[in-house]
Amino acid sequence: MLSNQLRPRRLRSSFNMRNLIRENSLSTNDFIYPLFVVAGERIRKEIPSMPGCFHLSVDEAVKTAELVAALGIPGVEIFGLPEYKDEIGSGAWDPQSPVQRAIKAIKKAVPELLVVGDVCLCQYTSHGHCGQLNGNCIDNDKTLPLLAKVAVSQAEAGADIIAPSDMMDGRIAFLRAALDDKGFNDTILMSYTVKYASGYYGPFRDAADSTPQFGDRSTYQMDPANSREALKEVELDLDEGADIIMVKPALAYLDVVKSVRAACTRPIAVYNVSGEYSMVKAAALNGWIDEKRVVLESLLSMKRAGADIIITYHALDAARWLNE
Ligand code: PBG
Ligand code: ZN
């Protein structure tokens, strides 16, 4: 009996056998760690909705960036809380804003660490939307030149990678042209190509004070019910010149990651967003799950689905565990 039968358990029989046939792996090289920078000095204030994440003044952000590099993580992504908001979000391209100052200071202190600038207006507009208003509508084409100002100001501060998260149509081609025009031909565009209108952004909006003051983002971010539409967004961004394609959120959209992987040869990033992070943290703090196991298993699932890059608030912990 069973003599001719393939027994999958043979290949699971020992530690080394499992290591030998493993299909996917996680490495510290896979991660980008997001940082929230604020004005002031010596500020390191824990974000209530995201335990283990902090609002950092620029000096503290530099210290964290040094730690990130020491752990073997290739990059950080910078988000900022501005000192002022207005109708058009002009703080987003102010060279004295915390984001621009942090980019400059981190590139000076740790030149080899990749710095990603998140390009959007929602943290900077009084209404909390990602674009310029025309009545109660978000005006796509009026927003593009504003995003270009943000991208150029971050490139001037030294950002290696520009990551537009606004979801306006045509912004990749527009930003590519604006960057090239200023001589930033080598600045990389990592597009938030497939970004869903998600409830999982809740903790981030508390952290970044970017909740829309009226309505929601469903006229520009994608409907969670759609997957073919993701491939249409990918096609457009490939055409417009995105260097890296992103899918966001990650865990609830791994099917989308897999289909995007099949549709494109450019590197794919996934954004393991704030709500995904905070749910795991809350369960871990209650002693309901084994945090290390669950985090590493979730991050590995993103690699298995086809991601090359994982933007995650778990990056520091995961790197420590992987370096053990
Ligand atoms: C803003 C932006 C958001 C995130 C990154 N950039 C939220 C939003 O669209 O409201 C979400 C990140 C997270 O939840 O971790 N354009
Ligand atoms: Zn936004």
Image: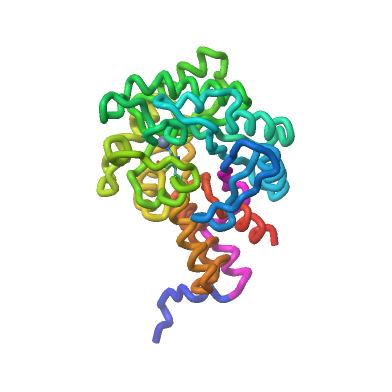
| Residue at image point 41% right, 24% down | 88
Q: Quadrant of ligand 1?
A: top left
| Residue at image point 58% right, 43% down | 35
Q: Residue 242's quadrant in the figure?
A: top left
Residue 71 in the image, given as x and y percentages of width and height: 69, 50
Residue 169 in the image, given as x and y percentages of width and height: 33, 27
Q: How many numbered marks are there?
A: 0
Left or right position of 208 against 227: right
**Residue lying farthest bottom?**
1
Residue 211 or residue 10, whichever sits in front? 211
Residue 10 in the image, given as x and y percentages of width and height: 52, 75
Q: Residue 241's quadrant in the figure?
A: top left
**Residue lying farthest top?**
181
Is residue 95 positioned above or below 123 on the image? above
Q: Quadrant of the N terminus?
A: bottom left
Residue 199 or residue 115, whichever sits in front? 199
Residue 269 in the image, given as x and y percentages of width and height: 48, 42
Magenta residues?
A: 14-35
